[in-house]
Image (spheres, grey):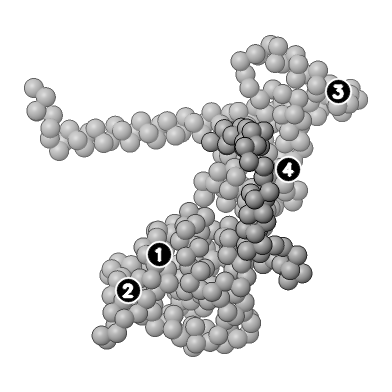
């Protein structure tokens, strides 16, 4: 009896129902979240209006928190601190329509981050829309605000308007940043290209997050054989929205015109050897330690492949004055050896302390 359902038609029905159920669950979750955010906004509005009308101060919020939690013991989010956030939320967004259409699409604590970290209404809207589009966690949202993503997006120098059709060129331009923030690396400003590439691969998740949504990693030191010679691309990606390969070249020096020529050569090869007939033209990104804008613009003027040039930021190296004040590895080893030699034989107290310390961190 069961075998009669092992058909393509049954599988098609099952897949269809699974899709419907998943979509309904997502819509339900979004709806519940929107209603909760709207409720918090309405609570904030009511508190604001009554404080203004009655002349009440901040103490009324503490009293409200106690009474509401007593009435709704199973409901989270009615703390004194959160009531203050609701009040601030109502002050930040005066329009219920804005709450329903924008803020209501984000979880409450995402809204709290945006509201408390940003005071400009336009910036708040920018990060709300970016968060909706990219699906950032709260930690990622906070990191993007702290690194001022809005000032970096779309700022790379490119020739996209001349080398890509209008819809793709605009999207590609907005996807690129300047500068890129690689402070998650332990590599410092004096790193060589090999160390930079190794560090990005070891922190690939953070690197992909900094690149932005849509990038799929293809490989590093990607081998291409061209005219019987071997060439290696630093990093190769495929962008799902652009429908094109993206070649990333890393340079630990300032931009030089010959870098653009070499990347132009790589893009021609990728278009011929890797791209499918339905793919859009491959795009190149040159990440340099520094650049002269005028030099970059001149260099890209005669390049016929789409290339963007941006800087990257690393963690700052220790100042020379501080380096000299820190002990070397050899000095530390000598100090440890001296301590070991000075320790009395059979010192039970020190052994006990060490055992307790190991127990705490094991």
> On the picture, is 98 further left or further right than 243?
right
Q: Is residue 22 left or right of residue 110?
A: left
Is 64 located above or below residue 223 in the figure? above
Q: Where is residue 105, by image quadrant?
A: top right
Helix, strand or loop for disc 4: helix
Percent across and percent down for residue 327 are: 70, 62
Neighbour class for label 3 at 10 Å: few (<14), some, many (≥20)? Answer: few
Which residue lies under the disc numbered 1?
237
Name the residue beneath numbered marker 3.
59
Counting residues from the start of the chain, the first of labels 2 and 3 encountered is 3
Label 4: how many Cα within 10 Å (few below 14, some 14–19, many 20+): few
Residue 316, percent from left and from top: 67, 65
Find out whether the residues at labels 1 and 2 contact each other: C-beta distance under 8 Å: no
Residue marked by disc 2: 223
Near-viewer residue (162 or 3) = 3
* 65, 101: nearer the viewer: 65
Determine the secondary structure under disc 3: helix
- In this rendering, position of residue 192 left or right of residue 126: left
Q: CA distance from mark 1 to mark 2?
A: 13 Å
Circle 2: element type: strand
Mark nearer the N terminus (3 vs 1): 3
**Residue found 31% across the figure and 33% down from its top:** 18
Q: CA distance from mark 3 to mark 1?
A: 56 Å
Which callout, 4 or 1, points at the residue further toward the start of the chain?
A: 4
Q: Nearer the viewer, mark 1 or mark 2?
A: 2
Q: Residues within 10 Å of mark 1 (few under 14, many from 20)?
A: many
Which residue shows up at 60% across the image and 28% down it? 36
Kindly identify which residue carries mark 4. Answer: 116
| Tag nearer the camera, 2 or 4 | 2
- On screen, 305 above or below 110? below
Question: N-terminal of the two: label 1 or label 2?
Answer: 2
Calculate the distance from the C-alpha at mark 2 to the C-alpha at mark 3: 68 Å
């Amino acid at each position: 009896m069961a075998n009669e359902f092992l058909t393509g038609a049954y599988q098609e029905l099952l897949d269809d129902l699974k899709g419907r159920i998943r979509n309904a669950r997502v819509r339900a979750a979004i709806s519940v979240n929107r209603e909760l955010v709207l409720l918090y906004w309405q609570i904030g509005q009511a508190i604001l209006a009554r404080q203004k009308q009655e002349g009440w101060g901040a103490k009324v919020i503490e009293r409200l928190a106690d009474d509401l939690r007593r009435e709704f013991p199973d409901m989270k989010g009615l703390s004194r601190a959160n009531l203050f956030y609701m009040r601030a939320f109502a002050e930040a967004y005066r329009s219920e329509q804005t709450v329903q259409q924008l803020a209501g699409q984000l979880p409450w604590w995402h809204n709290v981050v945006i509201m408390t970290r940003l005071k400009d209404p336009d910036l708040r809207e920018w990060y709300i829309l970016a968060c909706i589009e990219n699906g950032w966690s709260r930690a990622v949202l906070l990191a993007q605000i702290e690194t001022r993503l809005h000032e970096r997006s779309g700022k790379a120098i490119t020739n996209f308007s001349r080398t890509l059709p209008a819809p793709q060129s605009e999207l590609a331009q907005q996807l690129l940043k300047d500068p890129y923030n690689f402070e998650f690396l332990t590599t410092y400003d004096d790193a060589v290209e090999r160390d930079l590439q190794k560090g990005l691969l070891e922190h690939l998740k953070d690197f992909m997050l900094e690149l932005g949504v849509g990038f799929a990693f293809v490989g590093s030191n990607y081998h291409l054989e061209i005219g019987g010679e071997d060439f290696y691309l630093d990093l190769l990606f495929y962008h799902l929205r652009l429908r094109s390969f993206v070649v990333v070249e890393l340079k630990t020096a300032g931009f030089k015109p010959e870098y653009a020529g070499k990347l132009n050569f790589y893009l021609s090869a990728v278009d011929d050897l890797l791209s499918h007939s339905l793919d859009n033209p491959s795009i190149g990104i040159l990440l340099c330690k520094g650049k002269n804008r005028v030099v970059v613009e001149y260099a890209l003027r005669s390049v016929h492949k789409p290339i963007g040039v941006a800087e990257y930021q690393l963690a700052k190296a220790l100042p020379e004055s501080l380096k000299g004040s820190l002990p070397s590895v050899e000095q530390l080893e000598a100090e440890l050896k001296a301590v070991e030699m000075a320790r009395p034989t059979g010192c039970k107290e020190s052994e006990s302390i060490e055992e307790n310390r190991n127990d705490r961190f094991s």
